[in-house]
Amino acid sequence: MEDIRTVRRSAESIAGRCGITAMTALALLGVPTPASAATACADVELVFARGTFEPPGIGATGVAFVDSLRSRVGGRSVDVYAVNYPASLDFATAADGIVDTSNRVRELSVSCPDTQIVLAGYSQGAAVIAYTTKDEVPAGYTLPAGITGPMAPSVADHVAAVALFGKPSNGFLQLVQRDAPPVTVGDRYLAKTIDLCVSQDPVCSPAGSDHEAHSRYAVNGMVGEAAAFAAERLS
């Protein structure tokens, strides 16, 4: 007992000198920490990528979607992860979102294997999510820095549903990034994906001409449709 107290005092001393928590110091010293100190795993985690120019977070569509999803999953806990990427007009930086999304999904599949993952995104964020699900790299396409290839097939088993809002069409994509590969969903994720597009939205619909339509996903009922789709697959 005295040895343990001595180790704990050493941990507290390390923490004070290094500006870290005593719990972290205990871990560094190889001392088991209480189970309550471990990060709890949610029943469901929503990984959401916001649209262009939206501030960091999940944006209006993401907020509406998670609110609707939570109302449909009973007492199950739902955590939210906001994909970290610029969401700017420089579409090439969408690669940062792909890296962040794939890293988060891989991490969850290992650290919280029983957590069901819902992937979702709006506008450019929908492209980020779709790219993350790809099964293979298009022939002749050079991967951006930080991306080594598709996620392992086993990771798909941890993803319960994918929801895409206003995903850029290939025609629209050519206007903003001519060398970008088509935005498609990988085969392992197709059956659990809902891909929603307002017919008047020129970003996702070749026939669309109403630019305001692209900003209505949070209020036009489609988040509810997607939440119902995801909740069914979570059950």
Image (cartoon, grey):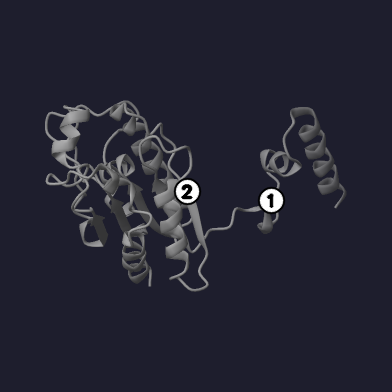
| Residue 224 place in picture, x, y as percent | 36, 64
| Residue 218 place in picture, x, y as percent | 38, 54
What residue lies at 67% left-to-right and 53% top-to-bottom?
37
What residue lies at 26% left-to-right and 46% top-to-bottom?
130
Q: Say how many tags the image has.
A: 2
Residue topped by disc 1? 32
What residue lies at 50% left-to-right and 69% top-to-bottom?
76
What residue lies at 34% left-to-right and 71% top-to-bottom?
232
Asked if 68 appears above or below 48 in the picture, the reply is below
Asked if 76 appears above or below 159 in the picture, the reply is below
| Residue 234 place in picture, x, y as percent | 38, 68
Residue topped by disc 2? 81
Give neighbour class at mark 1: few <14, some 14-19, many 20+ (Cα, 10 Å): few
Of pointers 2 and 1, the one earlier in the residue sequence: 1
**SS for callout 2:** strand
| Residue 40 place in picture, x, y as percent | 58, 57
60 lies left or right of 36 = left
Give neighbour class at mark 2: few <14, some 14-19, many 20+ (Cα, 10 Å): some
Q: Amino acid at mark 2?
A: Tyr
